[in-house]
Image (cartoon, rainbow, N blue to C red):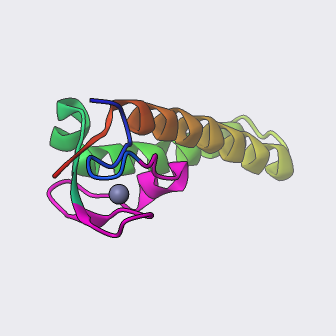
């Protein structure tokens, strides 16, 4: 089984579908429109709500820490944004590589 590929037509789903799919919720293949069920890495599936929380916190805390040390507000926000972006890219890559679709 290959990651992120429809089991019916072998079409690789676009990477941005990482944000559309949810555990135990069917998804329509972009190409053949059949219902396929995402099978996540078990760690992601168990910690689904936490994963979203970590994403929010990871961009919130750097901003707070920067503010505490009286770093310029613009730089603080930039730091928060960059950390958030890194977490987001890592998360997307991880889900994309570890998620399979079942019939
Ligand atoms: Zn398909």
User: How far across and how far down the image is residue 39, in percent?
Assistant: 20, 43
User: How far across and how far down the image is residue 67, in percent?
Assistant: 70, 44
12, above or below 94, in the image: below
Q: Nearer the viewer, residue 13 or 25?
A: 13
Q: Nearer the viewer, residue 33 or 22?
A: 33
Which quadrant holds residue 27? bottom left
Which quarter of the rendered picture does the N terminus lie within? top left
Quadrant location of ligand 1?
Answer: bottom left
User: How far across and how far down the image is residue 97, in percent?
Assistant: 41, 30
The residue shown at (44%, 63%) is 31
The residue shown at (24%, 33%) is 41
- Characterize the magenta stretch by its predominant secondary structure: loop
The residue shown at (36%, 34%) is 3
Can residue 16 be found in the magenta stretch?
yes
Relative horizontal placement of residue 31, taking residue 99 as reference (left or right) = right
7, above or below 35, in the image: above
Q: How many marks?
A: 0
Can residue 12 be found in the magenta stretch?
yes
The residue shown at (43%, 51%) is 18
Which quadrant holds residue 50? top left
User: How far across and how far down the image is residue 81, in percent?
Assistant: 69, 47
Question: From which residue to which does the magenta span run?
Answer: 11-35
Q: Nearer the viewer, residue 10 or 46?
A: 10
Relative horizontal placement of residue 93, taking residue 38 as reference (left or right) = right
């Amino acid at each position: 089984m290959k990651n992120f590929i429809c089991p019916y037509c072998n079409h690789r789903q676009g990477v941005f579908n990482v944000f559309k799919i949810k555990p135990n919720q069917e998804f329509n293949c972009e190409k053949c429109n059949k219902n396929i069920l995402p099978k996540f890495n078990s760690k992601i599936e168990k910690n689904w709500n936490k994963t979203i929380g970590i994403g929010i916190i990871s961009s919130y805390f750097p901003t707070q820490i920067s503010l505490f040390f009286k770093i310029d507000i613009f730089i603080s926000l930039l730091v928060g944004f960059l950390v958030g972006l890194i977490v987001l890219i890592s998360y997307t890559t991880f889900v994309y590589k570890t998620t399979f679709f079942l019939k």
